[in-house]
Image (tube, rainbow, N blue to C red):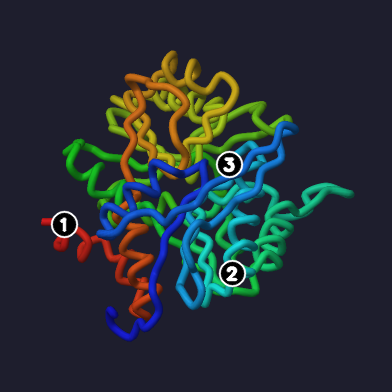
């Protein structure tokens, strides 16, 4: 028993986040629960929890990046635990897929993130835990509690350790200004905005920079990187405007299409990401930081009914990590 907790805690992982889940349980001081998948010849699969979860607080760790099998695995694991009389089921989704589909931006399209929220609730999730949603208002799509973790407590200490002079934080678009402004305030840095115009998804028509970057060491801040086209174009533009160096921190390394080639051939000094999504291949320009300890601490806070907001306090986290 820890704090006010009175139920046994068990942590399981889907196949999409196995390595991260192992790191989380290592920080947590426990092992992963025994779970297996029966696979049929036609590709269908069935999760099986190979130990009792009756009356337990159960945590399922699975990022829902493509393919959709990752989401289906999570839904079926939740359903299995609900039918096995688990007391409380938390879906730990470090990267919440379909988050870019958070509104109807044209007629007759799905709001995919709302559908995913409904599916998780219908499957039997009691709570959802995630990190750096593409749009914070997605939390309102859920009728269950949502713990929204912030990767800034990992990225900001890393940037501070670089010791960059004339540091400037850049938002990759107008929608990212709130996140970038927070980084700039904590780091005591200037803020610039890259204003982009899209022809269609993953295709940029034009880009301009709002602010001064002459002789600055620029760090672009974003929640995810997909093909890398926007980021690489921004890096080139910032260097052309006189920036001394350009780096980027992006929480979720989706990295689809020609992303790795784009990054390797770009003017980026470094791309810093987390392990919410496993990297598909190695790159000399990509550095991956782990979110395992942060999620481990958040899981402990959930089942012990203690505050999670303290995990967002950067100064406090730095003190605890000394």
Q: Residue 65, labelled with which disc?
A: 3
23 displayed left or right of 228: left
Q: Residue at x 67, y 42 (%)?
A: 68
Q: Which residue is mark 1?
A: 321
Q: Which residue is mark 2?
A: 84
> Splitting the image into 4 quarters, where does residue 265 fall?
top left
Mark 1 or mark 2: which is in front? Answer: 2
Q: Is residue 170 visible?
A: no
Mark 3 or mark 1: which is in front? Answer: 3
Q: Residue at x 62, y 37 (%)?
A: 66
Q: Position of residue 316 (x, y in %)?
A: 20, 66
Q: Residue at x 38, y 21 (%)?
A: 282
Q: SS for tag 3?
A: loop
Q: Position of residue 69 (x, y in %)?
A: 65, 42
Q: Residue at x 35, y 49 (%)?
A: 291
Cα distance in 3D space between marks 1 and 2? 38 Å
Q: SS for tag 1?
A: loop
90 displayed left or right of 25: right
Cα distance in 3D space between marks 3 and 1? 30 Å
Q: Position of residue 276 (x, y in %)?
A: 44, 44
Mark 3 near mark 1, Cβ–Cβ under 8 Å?
no
Cα distance in 3D space between marks 2 and 3? 27 Å
Mark 2 or mark 3: which is in front? Answer: 2
Q: Earlier in the sequence, mark 3 or mark 1?
A: 3
Mark 1 near mark 2, Cβ–Cβ under 8 Å?
no
- Mark 1, Cα crowd under 10 Å, few <14 / some 14-19 / many 20+, is few
**Up-down: is 50 above or below 170?**
below
């Amino acid at each position: 028993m820890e704090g006010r907790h009175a139920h046994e805690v068990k942590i399981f992982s889907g196949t999409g986040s196995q390595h991260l889940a192992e790191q989380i349980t290592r920080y947590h001081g426990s092992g992963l629960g025994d779970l297996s998948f029966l696979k049929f010849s036609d590709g269908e699969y069935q999760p099986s929890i190979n130990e009792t979860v009756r009356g337990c607080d159960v945590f399922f760790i699975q990022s829902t990046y493509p393919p959709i099998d990752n989401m289906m695995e999570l839904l079926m694991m939740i359903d299995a635990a609900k039918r096995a009389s688990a007391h409380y089921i938390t879906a730990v989704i470090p990267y919440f897929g379909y988050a870019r589909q958070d509104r109807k931006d044209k007629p007759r399209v799905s709001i995919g993130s709302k559908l995913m929220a409904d599916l998780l609730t219908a499957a039997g999730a009691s709570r959802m835990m995630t990190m750096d949603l593409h749009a914070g208002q997605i939390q309102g799509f859920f009728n269950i509690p949502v713990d929204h973790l912030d990767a800034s407590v990992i990225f900001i200490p890393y940037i501070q350790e670089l010791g960059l002079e004339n540091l400037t934080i850049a938002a990759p678009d107008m929608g990212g200004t709130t996140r970038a402004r927070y980084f700039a305030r904590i780091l005591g840095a200037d803020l610039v905005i890259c204003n982009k115009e899209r022809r269609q998804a993953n295709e940029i028509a034009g880009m301009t920079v709002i602010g001064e970057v002459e002789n600055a060491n620029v760090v672009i801040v974003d929640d995810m990187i997909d093909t890398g086209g926007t980021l690489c174009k921004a890096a080139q533009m910032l260097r052309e405007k006189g920036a001394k160096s350009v780096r980027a921190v992006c929480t979720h390394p989706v990295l689809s299409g020609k992303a790795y080639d784009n990054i390797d051939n770009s003017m980026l000094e470094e791309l810093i990401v987390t392990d919410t999504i496993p990297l598909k291949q190695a790159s000399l320009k990509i550095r991956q930081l782990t979110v395992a300890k942060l999620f481990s601490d958040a899981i402990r806070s959930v089942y012990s009914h203690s505050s999670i907001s303290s995990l967002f306090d950067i100064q406090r986290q730095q003190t605890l990590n000394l």
